Image: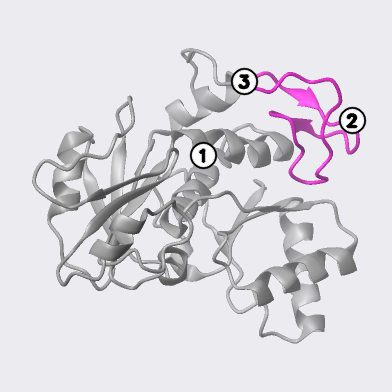
Amino acid sequence: MPTAIAVTSADMALPAQDERTVPAVVLSGIDQKPLEQAVVELHALIEQYGYLVVVCSRATPATVMQRLHTLRSLLESDRVAFFRPELPPLGIAVLARQLRQLASCDLSPGILASAGRLLTHYLHAGAVLGSVARLDRVPVGLKAHARSWVPGSQFAVLAHPEPQLVKVAPGAVLKGPEFSTWMLVAKGQLQSEWVGGLGGQWSVHGLREVPLPAESRDWWGTGRVIEFCGHLADLSVLYQLVTSVRQTSCHWCGLDVIGDLCVFCSATPPAREPAAPRALEQRSPA
């Protein structure tokens, strides 16, 4: 069985990108269940899949994260990894789906888990906001704060990979990826045509809509939001990116990893050079 990729709510489990994308394990309400029941269910997942990678955002409720850490401690398991990159919720959902795509390939649990850190570099995640008054995850100047109180004002924000903020107006531009992507859009309580124009600026292959994750309101500080994410969707490209990076064995748990950190045991390999993407080679996912 492939390594399981888990999310903490159903709205973070995006529809499959292709026929090979494995289903997400959804840990909905895990903090609401009796502790004994939650332990049994998580143990069953580990026994079924061998390894579990939980992908969650920085806006995931603290009670959920506390329960997950408690469960891993009680099970004394090093086969459960928590991955919480600095991405908005829609970006987290996209990353989880990319890992679900790769889970169908011949990648070991350690490589698959550490691939998440590599793939974040190729995500462009942001939003159009009706207000930046409560936005604290992206630098916001005093002028933008003042403008956010003007009725009808909208702001385009890129949170990753490089923070950007512009007032939505004709000619407003956010610097985008230097490679072709698809774009996902999730609409909240805001109407704007600007995102469609952004897709044209970024020369995306296509634009698809999905429901707005519940955590987006907390992450962006407002429900008046249209979240977007430019991403790589082709499995062969994702596979080439991951397999082009130098692999080593974790000196602590023995898993094969890429990068400078084992996601499962959190051990940093000694005397390593940070892994970096290399030129893509023509390979096909096995």
**Residue on which the image places disc 1:** 120
Query: Image quadrant of residue 104?
Result: top right
Q: Position of residue 27 (x, y in %)?
A: 61, 70
Pointers 1 and 3 in contact (C-beta within 8 Å)? no
Q: Position of residue 101 (x, y in %)?
A: 50, 42
Q: Which amino acid, by three-letter code, is at mark 1?
A: Thr
For residue 245, the mark is 3
Q: Residues within 10 Å of mark 2 (few under 14, many from 20)?
A: few
Residue range highlighted in magenta: 246-275
Q: Residues within 10 Å of mark 3 (few under 14, many from 20)?
A: some
For label 2, the SS is loop
Q: Residue at x 42, y 63 (%)?
A: 135
| Left or right: where 39 falls relative to 228 | right
Q: Residue at x 49, y 12 (%)?
A: 279
For residue 155, the mark is none
Towards the viewer: 285 or 75: 75
For residue 251, the mark is 2
